[in-house]
Image (cartoon, grey):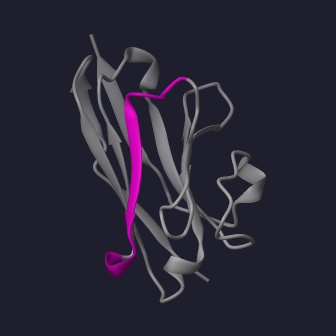
Amino acid sequence: QVQLVESGGGLVQAGGSLRLSCAASGRTFSYYAMGWFRQAPGKEREFVAAITWNAGNTNYADSVKGRFSISRDNAKNTVYLQMNSLKLEDTAVYYCAADRSSACNTAFRPSDYDYWGQGTQVTVSS
């Protein structure tokens, strides 16, 4: 079992930056691939980015490629999402998730992930 707690969300102007953090409890964090998802009002939860256990591989949704960067620090049990050049359409609740089935995959389906945080709101204004 792992518990995930996101932080770093907030209100930012279009073109600005935010860095989200996701702190995990437990000693098995480094065994999991990690992902970030987001959900806007009235929309389904969608994949944003994922990273393997050793950060050897990452995967991004086309909508965020070149603007967002996922990273992790296994010594701190934390995964990050650096978000630059934010757009109005990035407004959503952002969730981190842990995939316990395979540390070497960068899965993009919510059903592939076993543990979820409570989410942090990101609002981009014009």
Left/right of residue 12 with respect to residue 1 in the rendered view = left
Foreground of the two, 100 or 88: 100
Residue 16 vs residue 4: left or right?
A: left
Q: Is residue 36 visible?
A: no
Furthest residue in direction front, as rendered: 56
Q: How far across and how far down the image is residue 113, in percent?
A: 69, 60
122 sits left or right of 41 in the view = left
Location of residue 8 in the rendering, given as x and y in whole percent from the top left corner:
28, 49
Quarter of the image with the C terminus in it: top left
Q: Residue at x 29, y 22 (%)?
A: 85
> What residue sits 65% from the left and 53% below the top?
106
Q: Tell me, yes or no, whether the highlighted magenta stretch contains residue 3.
A: no
- Residue 63 image offset from top left, x and y in percent: 53, 23
**Looking at the image, which is closer to me, 26 or 31?**
31
Where the N terminus falls, by quadrant? Answer: bottom right
Q: Measuring 51% from the left and 61% from the top, which residue is drawn there?
A: 56
Q: Is residue 15 above or below residue 113?
A: above
Q: Which residues are magenta?
A: 63-76
Residue 6, compared with residue 2, is above or below; it is: above
Residue found farthest to the top: 126
